[in-house]
Image (tube, rainbow, N blue to C red):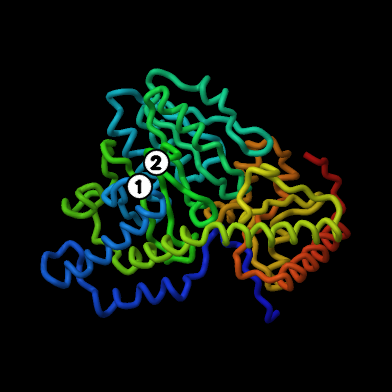
Amino acid sequence: MDRKIYLDNASTTYVSSEVLNEMMPCFNVIYGNAGSVHSFGRDAMAIVDRARDRVKEAINAQKANEIYFTSGGTEADNWAILGIAHAYAGKGKHIITSQIEHHAILNACHQLEKEGFEVTYLPVDSTGLVDLAELLHAIKKETILISIMTVNNEVGTIQNIKAIAKIAHDYNILFHTDAVQALGTMKLDVQDMEIDLLSLSSHKIHGPKGVGALYIKEGIAIEPILFGGENQERGKRAGTENVPGIAGFGKAVEIASKHYMITNQKLKTIRDYFLEQLGKNLDNFQVNGHPHQKSNAILNVSFYGVEGESVLMLLDLAGICVSTSSACTSKSLLPSHVLKAMGIPEEVAQSSIRISFGTNISKSDVDYVVSEIVKVVNKLREISPIKMRRN
């Protein structure tokens, strides 16, 4: 099959030509170590500083030195959870998060539980939203951190971040959000949203893999989780700066934040047309996640009577790339922890695929994808007509 259509942008995106052009000089022209004091090092550090300014502007941080570059979203999430827990353990050892967080958050919390911390994993409703009453009920005098992701990476539900942050601050608790899937499709303003810590990743917005950032509001203490050079990232994050990656990330952030409104509208048009065509040609499916408060980039669909993994494999043979959950857990045979937390029956959850759109998808592409999904699902239902209950 010569035709290839990529619909797994929540997993990763291609590197744009503008970003690639920004990175190229860092490989063989400005290739110094940004920590060196000579001219080659200063030139490299100037590139890092420019990227830091770009991230600062994109999320409306007060100061550029509140931005710390990491190896990606996972490290940023790990650092936020572990670094804050260790820094504020003297105040309390209780953390609140949700059951539908990325495993970079959940597994960091599991590690803290082994160290004697207590973690409350908030349930969500059938649309994937955290109940603010449940959050209020979970708060204790020992609570030091609340971490709730902005946009869920599997179903696209957007949390009430500003309200959650306000609740946290009303009780003198720090608030962190994983905004990896939010950057580029919605406005992020850490001051207006009252965010203390925020995780970002480059490769979700047409930047290179292996680089991300953690915003840490000035005045907040945090313990490092990497140890080495004391002058790297102002003594907070050891390791020689990935100058090419940081340069590309900075450019990708600049482009994504500048065009987020146009991008979001394009994605909405694509998503709406896809669902319209799918509804005209196929019965017995459900869309998972919030019906309105959602990212237009992510669509999670359950096709009753089939296995999502089989749908994925047959679509791949037709040149269409989708996923069954987040890329980090897609090789697991276990049902999605996100769909499970939303109360979706296991058999329905296992019939789900995640489609994540990019703005380069055409109407013709959508027509082709819908036609292939209809063929695949109907074929699978004929082969194994399983009766499945609706959620």
- The residue identified by callout 1 is 61
The answer for how far apart the CA atoms under marks 1 and 2 are is 7 Å
Asked which quadrant contains residue 281, the reply is bottom right
Query: At label 2, which amino acid type do we have?
Result: Gln
Image side of residue 258 versus residue 294, left or right? left
Q: For mark 2, give the secondary structure.
A: loop
How crowded is the residue under tag 1: few (<14 C-alpha within 10 Å), some, or many (20+)? many
Image side of residue 386 versus residue 234, left or right? right
Q: Position of residue 370 (x, y in %)?
A: 77, 65
Q: Are marks 1 and 2 in contact (CB under 8 Å)?
A: yes
Q: Position of residue 4 (x, y in %)?
A: 65, 75
Q: Above or below — where is 153 with respect to 115?
A: below
Foreground of the two, 230 or 110: 230
Q: Position of residue 234 (x, y in %)?
A: 20, 50
- The residue identified by callout 2 is 191
Say which quadrant the N terminus sits in: bottom right
Residue depicted at x 39% and y 66%: 251
Q: Above or below — where is 277 with respect to 89?
A: below
Q: Position of residue 93 (x, y in %)?
A: 36, 25
Q: For mark 1, give the secondary structure.
A: loop
Query: At label 1, which amino acid type do we have?
Result: Ala
How crowded is the residue under tag 2: few (<14 C-alpha within 10 Å), some, or many (20+)? few
Residue depicted at x 43% and y 28%: 168
| Marker disc for residue 260 | none
Nearer-N-terminus badge (1/2): 1
Which residue is outermost to the left?
38
Q: Above or below — where is 311 with respect to 86?
A: below
